[in-house]
């Protein structure tokens, strides 16, 4: 019986040693995990940014606010269901300066999204979205489950 001399990390990840060096394992890509290292890097760089939101309630509505400055309304997609809201968009960068001219770069450019699970069901047909000075405000009226109405019976 031959003893497996690979480390726990090597057995766990499928890594192999290169040139007999026991301290620096090389990751070995497989077909099931993307094929090559370049595809892993591309996958990481294509991720969307996550939009920050404030979510609160009033007696009759759920309100979601988010800063979307620099995003045109036509580049924004808001999808709602009775218990879920998804906001997607893309902020395009206007590149005028060279990278070497920057001292600091903190603004996010590119695609972003955010999905919010709502604490209560809402009336999708009465929901409103307003953008003012870069602030997106979603007003989502709560469904009144206690509301009753009389149904008139007709003859056929």
Image (tube, rainbow, N blue to C red):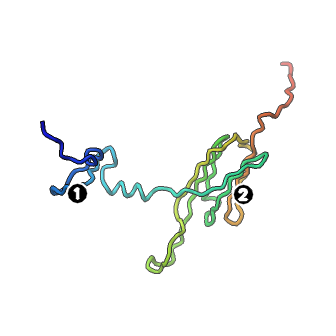
The answer for how far apart the CA atoms under marks 1 and 2 are is 57 Å
- Total of numbered circles in the picture? 2
Decide if residue 122 is on the left or right side of residue 148: left
The C terminus - image quarter: top right
Camera-nearest residue between 115 and 111:
115
In the displayed orientation, state which residue is furthest to the left.
1
The quarter holding residue 69 reads bottom right
- Which one is earlier in the sequence, the residue at label 1 or at label 2? 1
Which residue was labeled with disc 1?
23
Crowding around mark 1 (Cα neighbors within 10 Å: few <14, some 14 to 19, many 20+) is few
In the displayed orientation, state which residue is furthest to the top.
156
Decide if residue 147 is on the left or right side of residue 127: right
In the displayed orientation, state which residue is furthest to the bottom.
101
The quarter holding residue 50 reads bottom right
- Element assignment for label 2: strand
- Element assignment for label 1: loop
Crowding around mark 2 (Cα neighbors within 10 Å: few <14, some 14 to 19, many 20+) is few
Decide if residue 88 is on the left or right side of residue 154: left
Give me the disc on residue 38: none
Residue at image point 83% right, 31% down = 148
* Residue 43 place in picture, x, y as percent: 40, 54
Which residue was labeled with disc 2?
130
């Amino acid at each position: 019986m031959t003893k497996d001399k690979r480390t726990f990390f090597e057995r766990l990840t499928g890594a192999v040693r290169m040139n007999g060096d026991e301290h620096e394992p090389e990751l070995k890509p497989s077909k099931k995990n993307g094929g090559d290292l370049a595809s892993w890097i591309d996958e990481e760089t294509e991720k969307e940014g996550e939009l920050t939101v404030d979510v609160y309630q009033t007696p009759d509505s759920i309100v979601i606010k988010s800063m979307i400055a620099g995003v045109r309304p036509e580049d924004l997609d808001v999808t709602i269901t009775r218990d879920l809201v998804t906001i997607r968009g893309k902020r395009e960068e206007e590149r005028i300066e060279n990278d070497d001219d920057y001292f600091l770069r903190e603004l996010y450019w590119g695609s972003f999204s955010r999905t919010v699970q709502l604490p209560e069901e809402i009336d999708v047909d009465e929901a409103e979205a307003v953008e003012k000075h870069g602030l997106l405000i979603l007003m989502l009226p709560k469904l009144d489950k206690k509301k009753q109405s009389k149904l008139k019976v007709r003859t056929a």
